[in-house]
Amino acid sequence: MRAMLLRPAASLGLLLVIAHVLIAIAAPWIAPFAPTSLLDTPLEPPNATYWLGTDDLGRDAFSRLLWGGRVAMLVAFSAGAVAVLGGALLGLSAAYRRGSFDDVLLRLVEMKLAVPTILFVAIFVTGFGQSVPVLIVAVGIIQMMGVVRTTRAAGIVLMEQGYVRAAQLNGESGPTIILRDLLPNVADLMAVEFALRASSALLLVSALSFLGLGISPPTPDWGLMVEDGMALLESEPALVLAPALCIATLVLGINLAAEGLADALGLDAARGGSG
Amino acid sequence: MPLGWMQHEAAVAEPVLQVRDLSIAWRGPDGRANRVVDGVSFDLAAGATLGIAGESGSGKSTLARALLGHCRTGSTISGGSIRLNGDDLVALSAPDLARRRGRVMAMVPQNPLASLTFHMTVGRQLQEVLRLRAGLSDKAARLRALELFDQMGLPEPEQLMGRYPHQLSGGQRQRVVLACAIACDPLLLVLDEPTTALDKTTEAQVLELIRRLRSARQGAMVIVTHDLNVVADICDRVLVMQHGRIVEQGPVAEVFVSPREAYTRLLLGAALRVEEASRAKPAAPGQALLEITGLGFRYARPSILRRIAPGPPILEDIGLTLAQGEVLGVIGESGSGKTTLGGIVTGLLTADTGRVVFDGAALAARRTPEQRRRIQMVFQDPLSSLNPRRRVGDSVMRPLRLFQGLDQRAASRRAAELFEQLGLEPELLSRFPRQLSGGQQQRVAIARAFAAGPDLLICDEITSALDASVQAQLLDHLAAIQRRQGTAMLLITHDLSVVWRMARRVVVMRGGRILEAGETEVIFRSPTNPYTAALLGAATRAARAGHPELIEANG
Amino acid sequence: MIYLILRRGALSLATLFLLASFIFFATEVLPGDALDVSLSADELAMMPPEVLARRKAELGLDRPILERYLSFLGGLLTFDLGRTIITRAAVADIVTMPLRNSLALAGVTLLLALPVALAIAMAAAHAKGRVLDNAVSGAAIIGYSIPEFVTGLLLIAVFAVWWPLFPATVTASTDDPLGVLLAAAPLAIATTIIGSIAYLGRILRVGLIEVMASDFVERLHLSGIPRWRILWLHALPAAMIPGLSAAALYAAALVSGVVVVELVFAYPGIGAELVRAVTRREVHVVQAIALAAAICVVLFNLVADLSIAALDPRTRR
Amino acid sequence: MIITRRALGGLALAPAAAAAQPSAPRHGGTITVAQCSANRFVASPQTARHPYFTVDLTTRIPYNALVWVDRQMRLQPELATAWAPATADQSVWDVMLRPGVRFHDGSPLRPEDVVASFELHRRRNFASGQIQKIEAMADGRVRFTLDAGNSEFPYVLAEYQNMIMPAAPLETIGNTGIGTGPFRFASTDPNRVAVYERNPAYWREGYPYLDRIELHNREGQQETALAGLRAGQFDMVMTIDPRSVRGLQRDADLVVDSGGGGHHYVIQLPKHPGSPFEDKRVRQALALSVDREAIVRLVYGEGNGWIGNDSHLVAADPNFLPLPRLPRAEAVARARTLLAAAGHPNGLNLGTLYWSPQSPEVGRYFQVLQETAREAGLTLALEQRPADGYVQFRTGDNDLSKGSFHRFAMTAVGPRNPGISLFRMRGEFVESGHWRGPEQDTYMALYAEAMREGDAARRRDIFHRMQRLLHEEVPALLPGGTMTFSVRRRHVQGFEFHPQIWSVRFDEVWRG
């Protein structure tokens, strides 16, 4: 961790992420108004009471901005966790067992890459509704396939290590070897993958909200605020620029932190970012 | 006609290379600067060949590169001077250095495969050096390249020009990079571990080639190696390095016969000396534990291909016996099939033909838990034999709880006992592998193997990743615990001195077959098979250095 | 080598079959069907249940699932993509032109983005760690972090409305000649290019830096070969290899993945057509587009593998 | 020095705008129109010109129907000059065709064409389902026989799908795109663009003024359409989201047209045992607590929406009976007393209201409804459902015995004539929440009477009695809706928008 802080870009990235997370957590206390209450005439320009003015329903845009990150981050980080945990377990079991299980898994990964993301989410959402848990699972599965590939590759290398051979020779069971010998040794790779998956999940969620397939009103969400504010880009630019800036800085922060973490651990972050 | 090395000593010419008080610092990721080369000074006369010997981490490679004015990223020359052909390389600017590299001083890299551009033919790479550095026209460069390849003893140079590096053998690749290095007939030629990646027979041919080059060139040569046999073979003077400092330097004859420094004596001590008595203790004659008859193995190819073109045989008709408590040495170079043999006995691989009988019962592919317990294995790379994310104590206690079913307290007490038997302080139990040295890690791996109370231990090149100084200590501990537990041992290695020290009986393997088997003393002193003789010759050069009469005898 | 290609071909076919079935059953699980979506609430209110049932039977929406699956597979084998449910139009007519347009957009984007990404990677690798490298990789990360729809809409706001250099949206028609279409979509191309440069630039930069630290570059350096020659003739081809497979995947995603850009600029691409087909529950169109996207992925991967074989002799037996 | 579009626009148009007096309409010119309303079909090159599958809801550019509904929702002659019920029970209607009308290909309009057209319509679209038989009579009249009496049958003839096409077999009729309308098809790009040229032989003398209309489909992409408008790519954008109306009204260069009563929303109130809406007082409390005025003001903007009366009628309809207006405080107080009487003194949770984004502002409409209902103690959660499969979801399987009922959910209601709209409150239909009981029987009896009543004034009295009944019983909640809006550049003249976006006509439009 110390090595990571030596890199200015990485620490800036970390700072950005921490700032966003703290604001999101503290939103209920620091937001001047409730995000959904109808306060004043719509589309007031920014003024002393409403720092970013009011949105098109007369709600305080600044409070909604503070709350706006909560759901997006919840979905992005939990989808990232689903992707990394699921992906690592799948990838490592493929590396451990090889044979037909490995082949089938590779076919699934290749197939997932072939299905356009938007179609996958559209089907998932229309089938199971547009609630936050459904979004987390859908985005998680999309991101999981990339993690499967990188952890499988790392797993194959680990299988050649002496301590894994020794465990196999002593007749340790598959799950014990995977959980005790393989998983802890891909932990650093998983940390980098988590950061990459979380940032691309965030981008995906905001795009989905833009298409009306993501987070649904009345939950305050940056993607929705950008989509709503677009019609008023001319008259009330703040309504669009503020949430867009938040999305960009959070994703930027995660990416910078991921790069720094990858360099510090000597992994290759860029290649892990695809898929 | 091998020239005796004595004549060279007389022609003392004006020094080509003068290194004075050279220090090189390296700044790690954590910001701390540590001296990799610390105040090194030496001279090198024209026509002379200097050997820089030292174990890994002694700074010999960094020094070699410094002679070409090059430091890897993160390290800088922090003091001293390198005078070569009238210039002080330390003071020269980057462009000046670049102009001289290849022409005035050149280097033969350690790993030829990684040092050649994989997507370019070897011919084109050699011609590139000739055109750019020797200034030859395209046509002249092509002719000179053919000439050089021929001079290097490469077969059909014309055809070789169009081949890619991965299509050549190890020896051929070494000759190509050698050709590239001497393309501009440099004044100083630096060779970094020229023969480490080669098997003994190819090593002998390459050393012969280097010896011919030395006599044909006026320039000086520096050979960086950890193998004292190579130094004894072709160097006039030697410079022994440890932790970036010169421990001792002087003519090979003096240093090898009467080394002044303790560290030098330790290194020389590790070299094989067949004239002294073998230190391996005779084992009490127990009845047969392991019998292998008619063993054959090929790597599995996809089924449809197996019938059409089955893969090359890895093991053919292998047979050996091992009694209880006995130590059997298995000698062979890489590709001889010795590791595959170990893999079959432990159950990692299953043989195509033949039988492996262990304590009277034939071993099937799926082993019973008892069989798994009674056969244990120690691997070559110490760092990879222990799970980096678990404390070493846990790794050792795992088999105790798995096989003996001991509870936490009893297991940790037994682990502490094993540590003591292997000369490790009990408080190391709570450390992580990375906090231990290579030697300590290997001893923990041995402790883990003995924790299962095995009857048979397979050791696959367990010393080759360790420095000479640490090897001796490890082998003594291994011998002690092996004798106390009465465990039979299959000692697989390419290092003859390890077998001489540990095993009463030895088996010599090559190309998947057993060439010779018998008492170690008999075979090492009077080998019948020419291949064994060549191995022994190569391994005993350091011991015979300084006694010309011995050199003539073994060639 | 032939064995390798045969095996890969067989595996790709297996993937395509798996995918086709996944798409069929995925679109089957969707609750509504094409008829419901095509009727507004008023119309549905007036339609008696028995008329609704008759119309569904007419459109073949009530056939058992297995029968539809078999006819779907039958259609695949004879390359007959079937007809849309409501308008009985041939799916091929609806899909071919947008696919052509999306391939063109992806092609132009890659054609323009690859050289720039290469130049960025070369400059950054050449000046590793210095100001130029940090600036370039910083810009790449930023380009990578901004959602495409934000970039798109900002480009419109600046270059179409505030300073009217380019048309805001694409008014050319779907089957216009490609030249006309691409000329009418400068901002759409710019948006996809920004994302591509950022993504490809990062991958090539890492590949190059890795190769520059390799042994063969050190040998060339120690033989006095000039740095630019090492970079162009030796390091670049070696660095392209990891970059190629990532670029192939990215290119395939470009074809069907830029839905947001297509919607924002009304570019007549396959992504927008896919979203319309999903919301219209035109199952056959969805299946056709998904298969086209899959074939792109398989083809682009094959092209990448072949170019890797060309670049790296070690992969040729 | 960057010249903003507006400055340029202002300059160029300044001289024309200066001539303030309304100059006479000029012939010629082209206008480019972007339309943003939902487009229902995936058309192909063959079907792109068919009235059902053209670039949606602008069928009166290339085609005509027999009857037209004007901005005040009154019937106007189009290809029919006169129509009258042939039987007392209004189940048989005769229509007189306009003489001298020619199709774009020059062939004359004949009764056979009307018969062939309606043979397709009665099989394929909802409104004409009730037509049993169509006959071309000897004297050029066309006779329609219905399955039941319908005093408002002419409104069916005005539906946007019931266009008149040259006679052809059922499978191909309409594909040629030949109609009698003011413009004819020049070219089409399925689902994206339709280009029309002036029909020199149009049956309305002197019309249309324009030479050419380009219609671009920008369904769901209003922002980029408006950007195209400001950038000069488009001359007009049809069906825009009310919330951007305020911003556009500030722009001197643009004119916003409102079309009177546009679409609104019905909220089903399930009345099965155990449902909070079983008790009429809770339904009345909900009707009182929802601040309809706030919904119109916040979601649509002052004057850009209208307040509903819990019936399916739009305010622009002449038969619409406005609700008595109560001050907000009094309405909330009365709602609380009703709730207390119903046994919920400290408020009631109504469960989850499901909604689907059938138009851009729906999300905000229900957020305001949720917030204002809270003031009277009625809390409800909102959950968005995807458009696909939403019909099944909100209808459930309607089998009271099986227990899977319709849900507390919304759907859109279009501006239709009372015959269609008020029929949607029938007991067996889901939108009335399966309203049962004597009041529902009275309501349906009144409806049947209206359907048989030929005189418009007496029909209106019956409709008023029905709306008063709905106000008392509140079988469903219809808080109110929007106006329809379109925006054009100042040089586009003679255009009026319409409460029914599909009844827009471009005959009188000219370019200044």
Image (spheres, rainbow, N blue to C red):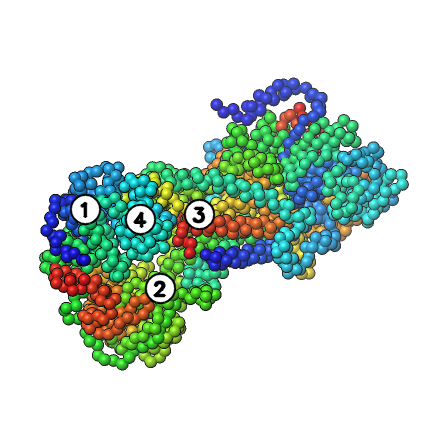
Give, as a three-letter code, the residue at label 4: Leu
Kindly identify which chain the residue marked by label 2 belongs to.
Answer: A
Q: How many marks?
A: 4
Q: Quadrant of the C terminus of chain B?
A: bottom left
Q: Chain of mark 3?
A: C
Expressed as whole percent of the image width and height from the top left, the position of residue C76 reads: 61, 55
Pinpoint residue B293: horizontal percent, then vertical percent. 34, 76
B344, above or below D327, in the image:
below
Nearest to N terminus: mark 1 or mark 4: 4
Question: Which mark identifies residue B432?
Answer: none
Q: Residue at x 24, y 37 (%)?
A: B96
Left or right: where A73 falls relative to D207: left
The residue under label 4 is B146
Picture quarter with the N terminus of chain B: bottom left
Q: Which residue is mark 2?
A: A164
Q: Residue at x 43, y 65 (%)?
A: B309
**Which numbered dot is residue B219?**
1
Q: Against C299, is C124 above or below?
A: above
Is the residue at mark 3 from the same chain as the one at mark 2? no
